[in-house]
Amino acid sequence: MSQSPATPLLDTVNLPADLRKLAPEQLRQLADELRTEMISAVGTTGGHLGSGLGVVELTVAIHYVFNTPDDKLIWDVGHQAYPHKILTGRRDRIRTLRQGGGLSGFTKRSESEYDPFGAAHSSTSISAALGFAVANKLQGQPGKGIAVIGDGAMSAGMAYEAMNNAREAGNRLVVVLNDNDMSIAPPVGGLSAYLARIVSSRPFLELREVARKISRKLPEPLHIAARKTDEFARGMAMGGTLFEELGFYYVGPIDGHNLDHLIPVLENVRDAAEGPCLIHVVTQKGKGYAPAEASADKYHGVQKFDVITGEQVKAVAKAPAYQNVFGETLAKLADSDPKICAITAAMPSGTGVDKFAKAHPDRSFDVGIAEQHAVTFAAGLAAQGMRPFAAIYSTFLQRAFDQVVHDVAIQNLPVRFAIDRAGLVGADGATHAGSFDITYLATLPNMVVMAAADEAELVHMTYTAALYDSGPIAFRYPRGNGVGVPLPEVPQQLEIGKGRIVREGTKVALLSLGTRLAEALKAADVLEAKGLSTTAADLRFAKPLDTDLIRRLMASHEVVVTVEEGSIGGLGAHVLTMASDEGLLDAGLKIRTLRLPDMFQDHDNPDKQYDEAGLNAPQIVDAVLKALRHNSAGVEEARA
Ligand SMILES: Cc1ncc(C[n+]2csc(CCOP(=O)(O)OP(=O)(O)O)c2C)c(N)n1
């Protein structure tokens, strides 16, 4: 019997142990309440909506059947874990999601023992779950590894690398394939088509069947039975699926919103004598919330919204988003250059490649979540005379670093890297911050690395990259909207390795790379008002450095400060190395490097993050004043 609406079941469930006290017939009501709570919370905070709504029943069922946290539940990407957070002691903070000091929008080890493994980049869950399972096996302790992975995440090679190795875990590994036939965008490629074929060719397991067929323990009886009857083989343990070939017992497809089906199947998998098992669950992204059901891609991630109408709060944009400036510029350039093509790894709208695809569908490639493949595919295209632009977020390009080194840079192939979401990104936090690309790219021989100071510069850099056939070239730009400068009618080809002086002074030189230029200019105003004549330069290139310009500024200014939206090892390190190599430091030059701090910064609003990083105008001013004071104090002390 369900309780009256006056006493919500959800109020009685703080932890999964409370959930396990409920009768199976109460779970439907609980799931409905959980869904309502999640919609209300994300309406307040914004965040990932569609994916979490799709796994409400799955979340309830897994925590009901498995013994979390001893059984380790690992959500791939972690963006669908909001219902999981509500059921694992975090309901009281669920309206702080993605806010400074609040809950992370992904799973995070430091947040809860129910988040055994942090995530945000996709396709890691099976490897991690396997690690937990094998560790428990080796240490002789109970506990399974349960990975819940989406069909989109299944396009990444890492998922197959893990499955290839999964037999190590025996029955301690359970993979739940959450198939909602969506990535952020519609899924692409052969695997997606394969899953669709499985789902369309085999009816959902019906309750009657589930009860009859899994009354015996998985997998042994099923396996024997599967050999006996065709009908059985089609319905339940289907030899011949890719997953079976990889050594899994495959169970499915199952309606992932039907708790009467999910619970007995999960119980049988839990009690299976052998393994590993893969349960193929079919769900709907956005389930139970009409606006999200109707437009799964638009409700993947949302701003705050009105729960009744589904209308999202729109920020008033003063300028176009960087990604769209890039996509539209590239589309225009490709009108007259048939060699230009664009590649995205499952982020067509996030990277602006959708704009390019509209104009040039035959030269646009969404390869799925497969950054490594995207880079080497681009290398092959370049080697055969095309002009490929691999448009990948800074954080996701990390995954393809060896491909950048081995397939692109060593062979000096002219792959163009359009690196979006460079610098701090706000609510998505440390996992999504584009902190390292200057460092990991500018260290490579042959590589050219640019950073756009504003959206007009991005147009010039896109054009410059299109014309550059001598080797790999990368240009980075931040998340969000431009600063509102007019876009150039005619793009300018930038001279490789040359920066520009934006404001000329005599005492302090600020060497900026990227969109901190605006802060550097604000700082210059403040310094000027204090009587410190200040130069601001936009270096444009982290590699090759404009050594002439830097040398000149070092020789003619008392203090030189580099400013960049990147980690240690980037522009500042290159400038310091150059200065030291050339003996410029010996003359007592006061040089400081402002960069991201040596820590993983938590989610917050980007301006606050940059404050914490010390990269806003007041901190630039402070660094200059300290350099002047510190050095003069130092000199005085030395004299005394
Ligand atoms: C390596 C990597 N590339 C890209 C992304 C961006 N991303 C986040 S969720 C997502 C779609 C995942 O689809 P799926 O696994 O099917 O989960 P769903 O959202 O449909 O539940 C993508 C592409 C990511 N998180 N990690």
Image (tube, rainbow, N blue to C red):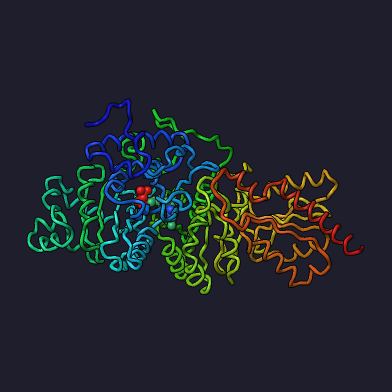
Decide if residue 303 is in sight here.
Answer: no
* Residue at 52% from the left image edge and 45% from the top image edge: 427
Residue 130 percent coordinates (x, y)? 34, 63
* Nearer to me, 479 or 449: 479
Residue 367 percent coordinates (x, y)? 39, 58
Q: Quadrant of residue 507?
A: bottom right
* Residue at 76% from the left image edge and 72% from the top image edge: 582
Q: Quadrant of residue 174?
A: bottom left
Residue 134 percent coordinates (x, y)? 34, 66
From this view, report whether residue 310 is shown above or below residue 88. above
Which residue appears farthest toward the right when viewing the image?
A: 640
* Residue at 23% from the left image edge and 39% from the top image edge: 23
Left or right placement of residue 591 versus residue 599 in this view: right
Q: Quadrant of residue 248?
A: bottom left
Left or right placement of residue 519 versus residue 254 in this view: right
Which residue appears farthest toward the left when viewing the image?
A: 228
* Nearer to me, 201 or 637: 637
Count of marks, rendered view = 0
From this view, report whether residue 473 is shown above or below residue 87. below
Decide if residue 233 is in sight here.
Answer: yes
Quadrant where the N terminus sits is top left
Which residue appears farthest toward the bottom when viewing the image?
A: 410
Quadrant where the C terminus sits is bottom right
* Nearer to me, 274 or 371: 274
Left or right placement of residue 338 versus residue 8 in this view: right
Left or right placement of residue 206 versus residue 392 in this view: left
Residue 459 percent coordinates (x, y)? 58, 52
